[in-house]
Image: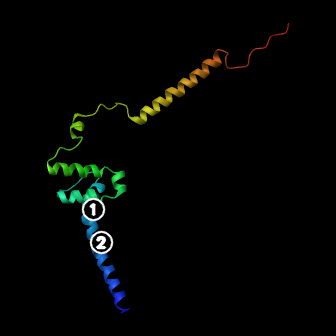
Amino acid sequence: MSRIKPILLVCMVLLALALLPSQALALAQPTSDCYKHNGQLTRHYSVAELRRALNTMPADVKEYSGCYQVIEDQLFRQLGRPVPGASQSSQGSAGSIISTPLLVVLIVVVIGGGGLAYVAWRRGSGGGGTPPTAAAG
């Protein structure tokens, strides 16, 4: 009886290892495709594959990539449903002409320049030094 247990255990481990890669690959096809191709699906997937990818997507991929939205949008398209937010994005957005980093740099320069101008003005008007002493006479 003690010989059967190790053999059974080895067989179960080998079976699990044989099935694991194929199952993981089948479940993650749309997700890995999207993740490897910077948020784009490069081939057609069935509705079942897309649903499975959405249900089994790892939390880090879901949080740090746009793949959940890409796969969900593709699923809506294949089901013939309107894609949420598609009508808004087709109209365009009223975004700023100036990029955010440039805007931050401009604000820092304006505030810093204003502070330096104030210090120079105070020094020039005599308000920044020590008060003059009365001359003895």
Q: Residue furthest left?
A: 80
Q: Is residue 100 left or right of residue 119?
A: left
Count of numbered labels shown in the rendering: 2
Residue at image mark 1 = 28
Q: Earlier in the sequence, mark 2 or mark 1?
A: 2
Query: Of 4 and 23, which appears nearest the observer?
Result: 4
Q: Where residue 102 sits: x, y (%)?
A: 42, 33
Q: Where residue 6 sits: x, y (%)?
A: 37, 87
Placement of 80 over or under 59, stated as above or below: above
Query: Of 116 and 45, which appears nearest the observer?
Result: 45
Q: At 22% across and 34% down in the image, what residue appears?
A: 91
Give, as a three-letter code, the residue at label 2: Leu
Q: Residue furthest top?
A: 137
Q: At 40% across and 35% down in the image, what residue appears?
A: 100
Q: Where residue 79 sits: x, y (%)?
A: 15, 51
Q: Is residue 131 left or right of residue 6?
A: right
Q: Secondary structure at mark 1?
A: helix
The quarter of the image holding the N terminus is: bottom left
Residue at image mark 2 = 20
The quarter of the image holding the C terminus is: top right
Placement of 86 over or under 9, stated as above or below: above
Q: At 20% across and 50% down in the image, what residue appears?
A: 74
Q: Where residue 117 sits: x, y (%)?
A: 57, 21
Q: CA distance from mark 2 to mark 1?
A: 12 Å
Query: Of 124 and 79, which appears nearest the observer?
Result: 79
- Pointer 1 local density, CA inside 10 Å: few below 14, some 14–19, many at least 20: some
